[in-house]
Image (cartoon, coloured by chain):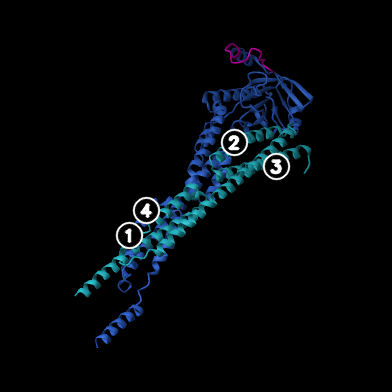
Chain colours: A blue, B cyan
Amino acid sequence: MKTALLAFALSFCVFCASSCQSPPVPQEVEKVKSQENDLWRAGAPLYAADDYSSYLESLRLAREKLIKQNARLRWFRDYKEIRADYIVLLAQGDSLLARVQSEKRSQSRDFSQRLGRLEDSMGKIRALTQLMNEHAPVRESLARAEVVTREVQILLKNEKYTELAPKLDMVDRHIRQAEEALFSILARYADDTQVADWRKQAEDTIAESRRRGTTAVLVNKLARTLTLLKKGREVAVYEIGLGKYGLSDKLYAGDEATPEGRYRIVKKNSQSRYYKALLIDYPNDSDKRRFALAKKRGLLSPGAAIGGLIEIHGGGKDSLTNGCVGVENSVMDRLFPEVAVGTVVTIIGSLESAAKLLSDLRNPGS
Amino acid sequence: MKKFSQFLVLGIFVVGLFSSCAKQPTQAIDAAKAAIEAATKEGASVYAADELKKLNDDLQAAMDEVNTQGKKFFKKFGTAKEMLVKVQTDADALKATIPAKIEAAKNAALQAQTEARTALDEATALLDKAPMGKGTKADIMAMKADLAGLETSFAEIQTAIDGADYFGASAKAATIKEKATVVSDQVKAAIEKVTGKR
């Protein structure tokens, strides 16, 4: 009897052990594992570091509870609380993922806008260099900026936003270098006193042409125009080209600058190397005084000469002169018969201040 | 009574044997962690970030198993130990692949640098033989300035390579090559403008 009772108890235990299965681990556990990977891949440690740390802490606590539950004898395991914790964790993760994606979109937008502004500046500077025939060191700095800009575009495409800020700073630095170089050239053109003086010279030339009923030529270096005046009226405006340092005022031979002031045509050459040419009387008295003063102050080498042979000639406006004013041959055909030896040629820097131009460069998009 | 005492002692001995002799695999844990650390130091976080993340996840799973068993009355660390050994093996294997990945990235950077140099040299040669006369002088002066800027940027490739930033060096070199090719195309267009060839 005793043996039979023992056998029954043993059989009962074996039955229990074999038939009572432990409840399965909630599927949310695996889902959270996969979610954590997604968060890591999306860049949660970079774009929502604090929230991600908090998520990991919640995950650690949930995992500890799971471990504790798994450590129990399987008949006593209960995953209800664990499942609830993991459901909360999944919701936390989903919300975090949405925040990460939103942060990335926001960063992408911000960086794209900043890049756009910088590209806008680069475009303006590039256009100015083309207009002014001013290259080194402005274009050098621009080329460096463009290399880094391309790298930025690649990083943006690959969503590597954390590496973008220093690269954009670098683009900014190169652009500023280009701007500084440009500003040093354009500074005179933003000086109100200087611009007022040029304006007066232009007005005097127009008034004299009107008063005497004569023809005159007005060259505007910044606007790159040559205006033909008859009896004080504008009869034609042509585009011109200048030299490498055409925006500077000529001081000595070889500086490739174009002189500014009131001159007269002293010779008409219909057989010029550059199609047809109108030689002006540079240097005038004012030029000679300025040259002598610069030499006295030691600003020029002792062997420096004042130069000459400044012409308005054909050959094309897109060329680089050595200080002359270049126009298209077709323009020369129209201009040549209209002017005579003695015609006044006034060359000015600009009628308008370049201050706005410089301000636009400093504040792109404004 | 004597027999009962003997059974009791034997029982305590058996229970003690099962519950205390199965100790935590601390050696395997340390070895797995050290292997991951070594792979990271080798550069896995840069050259095999996904694989490194998986290793860390596997280590976490193994540690969970260790902790689960640690809380049980009858501890069995066999599975945990197997998991830890696998983590260590995988980490060692990953570490072994890193030098080749670094070498490949370095070679790609050097190759890109060479291609950028070739593109720059070609553009320079074209500029040197371009007819700098009326109609092209301004363009050519501008392109020379652009090329000077690219030359300065080119030096930064070597700086990146020296700093083991091979991906950065490759990206910069590819950009310089692209820009130098644009200059070459512009020079060709300027030459065609002068010679009238189309």
Binning the other alpha carbons within 10 Å of mark 2 as few (below 14), some (14 to 19) or many (20 upward) gives few
Q: Residue B182, can we see it?
A: no
In-front residue for pair A192/A133: A133
Which range of residues does the magenta coloring cover?
A294-307
3D distance between C-alphas at marks 4 and 2: 41 Å
Point out which mark residue A151 bears. Answer: none
Binning the other alpha carbons within 10 Å of mark 4 as few (below 14), some (14 to 19) or many (20 upward) gives few
Amino acid on which the number 1 mark rests in the picture: Leu
Point out which mark residue A53 bears. Answer: 4
Q: Can you identify the residue that label 2 sits on? A: B155
Task: For mark 2, give the secondary structure.
Answer: helix
Q: Where is residue A94 in the image (x, y as percent from the top left)?
A: 40, 61
Q: Is the magenta stretch mostly helix, strand or loop?
A: loop
Q: Give the mark toward the camera: 4 or 1.
A: 1
Point out which mark residue B185 bears. Answer: 3
3D distance between C-alphas at marks 4 and 1: 12 Å
Q: Position of residue A255 (x, y in %)?
A: 65, 22
Question: From the image, which quarter does the N terminus of chain A lie in?
Answer: bottom left
